[in-house]
Amino acid sequence: MKNQSSNLHPRNLHQGRYDLEALAGSSPGLKEFIFTNPHGNLTLDFANPKAVKALNQALLKHFYQVEFWEIPDGFLCPPIPGRADYVHYSADLLADGNSGKIPIGPKISVLDIGTGANLIYPLLGVASYNWSFVGSEFNPEAIKSAQKIIASNPNVHGKIEVRNQSDDSKIFSNIIQPDEFFDLTICNPPFHESAQAAQEGSKRKIKNLTGKSVKSAPLNFGGQADELWTAGGEKEFIGKMILESAQFKNQVYWFTTLVSKSENLKSIHFQLERAGAFSQKTINMAQGNKQSRFVAWTFLNEKQQDAWKKFRWY
């Protein structure tokens, strides 16, 4: 079955076609969702949330040695190839200032803003580069789920920590502690402006997958309100993130966030200039026909960046 992700990062493990037989061999629970399409190829029903979840479990176990991965019903079930791309391009971002060498190992500390019930970025980052992660989260049920994933996978013990964000109006405050440093922050912000916009997006996705229009649609990738939408959408959320990041400008090397809508880039770049960012970058990514990107910024000048690397990476 084709993966529809032909333009992935070169280090992404999910190139070409999914080998569903091999994946089912690693995770037998996937077998019940595999069927042969009219062209004689093995495939899955991507409009079925249970099938998508079973595929994720198989991918995580087969490629990343994640033996246990469960999320509560209704929570975001992320497409793993695209999430892995963000991790790999972030690694390249660190390598750009390090003579092309990716800094690896637990000394590299990454903050995942809104890690969610699925804990996907820390799991991928630990497996790929052995980085250490802190995941922030506001939702108590999501925190409980993420902590269960950590407890059930001994290979990530001591490498991932989940912290409660007690104030949903804050992003970095309450999470980054005094005298604590992060080489990288990552974020998949809620990008819809309302619940209605999230539902319309879900209906478009169902139509793309099945060719059928529906009046209402269960989200095949799931998602709680705080995962999918926020007042003002991603533009306002990222604007708030930029303003707050300046308070921690000496404690983080690279701040980054996904940007779903390219039309928001102009405003984001302007806000970064106004906030005093020393450098900013837009890194483009592609998963099949889908174009995506993330924005990265740092307040550290070249001298401070050199000092950071000597202090933390060497």
Image (cartoon, grey):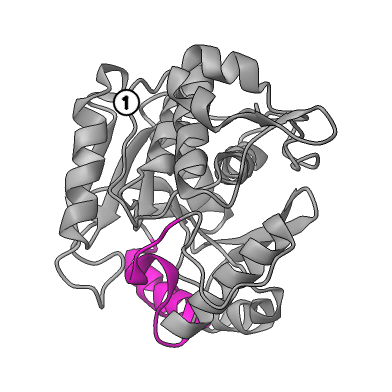
Q: Nearer the viewer, residue 47 or 246?
A: 47
Instruction: Give the x, y percent position of residue 222.
Output: 43, 57
Instruction: Give the x, y percent position of residue 16.
Output: 78, 30
The residue lying at 55 percent from left, 82 percent from top is 271
Say which amino acid is labelled 1. Phe
Is 245 inside the magenta-drawn segment?
Answer: yes
The extreme bottom residue here reads: 232
Instruction: Give the x, y percent position of residue 250.
Output: 37, 58
Q: Residue 6: which quarter of the image?
A: top right
Q: Is residue 193 above or below residue 109?
A: below
Q: Is residue 221 above or below residue 53?
A: below
The residue lying at 74 percent from left, 41 percent from top is 5
Q: Nearer the viewer, residue 165 or 229?
A: 229
- In screen coordinates, is 166 left or right of 168? left
Mark 1 sits on what residue?
68
Q: Is residue 300 above or below residue 56?
A: below
